[in-house]
Image (spheres, rainbow, N blue to C red):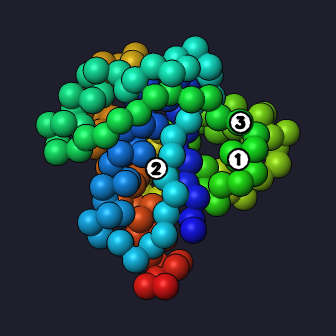
Amino acid sequence: MISVVFVCLGNICRSPMAELIFSKLAAERAPQLALDITSRGTSDEEEDNPIYPPAAKVLREHGITGAHRARQLTKREVVNADYVLVMDSSNLFDVLRLTGGMFSDKVFKLCSFTSRPRDVADPWYTRDFEGAYRDILDGCEGFLRYLLNRYGNK
């Protein structure tokens, strides 16, 4: 089982979008991979809140649905994960701070798996949920290609 945790600040916009997008892609394109896919936030300020309505709306417009409740990332989850995929440099710093700099070999920015590495801008502030969707989709597709190249058809 390959454990993947997507991480953003509050776990109500980008990381749950990534969790749901990646879950759908993996089910459609790589059903042979045994994956455990979750998402978390570096902050507890949105704890137990559902996905932010504008983020859910963009997902629905692209045929993606799913339930979600915000949860804060724990050090234990980082330790137990195979991959921790953060949305931006601030999230990367927060995860490395949480772990005392340990486990950096499994923490990546999601869009580092694309041909154009970048941060996924926070749509809470930019209000560009469609742009966030496109960046997250690009990152998820790149990460899935990476997993398929690494683990093949096992």
Q: Nearer the viewer, mark 3 or mark 2?
A: 3
- Circle 1: is it few (<14), some (14-19), or many (20+) Cα within 10 Å? many
Q: Which mark is residue 103?
A: none
SS under mark 1: helix
**Residue 118 placement (x, y as % from top left):** 46, 44
Mark 3–mark 2 Cα distance, whole angstroms, equals 22 Å
**Residue 73 placement (x, y as % from top left):** 65, 34
The reply to whether discs 3 and 1 touch (Cβ–Cβ < 8 Å) is yes
SS under mark 2: helix
Q: Earlier in the sequence, mark 2 or mark 1?
A: 1
**Which residue is at a point 16% across and 45% down the rendered structure image?**
63
Numbered label tally: 3
Q: Which mark is residue 111?
A: 2
Residue type for callout 2? Cys
**Residue 70 placement (x, y as % from top left):** 50, 27
Residue type for callout 1? Val
Mark 3–mark 1 Cα distance, whole angstroms, equals 7 Å
The residue that label 3 is drawn on is: 74
User: Does residue 52 show up?
Assistant: yes
The residue that label 1 is drawn on is: 78
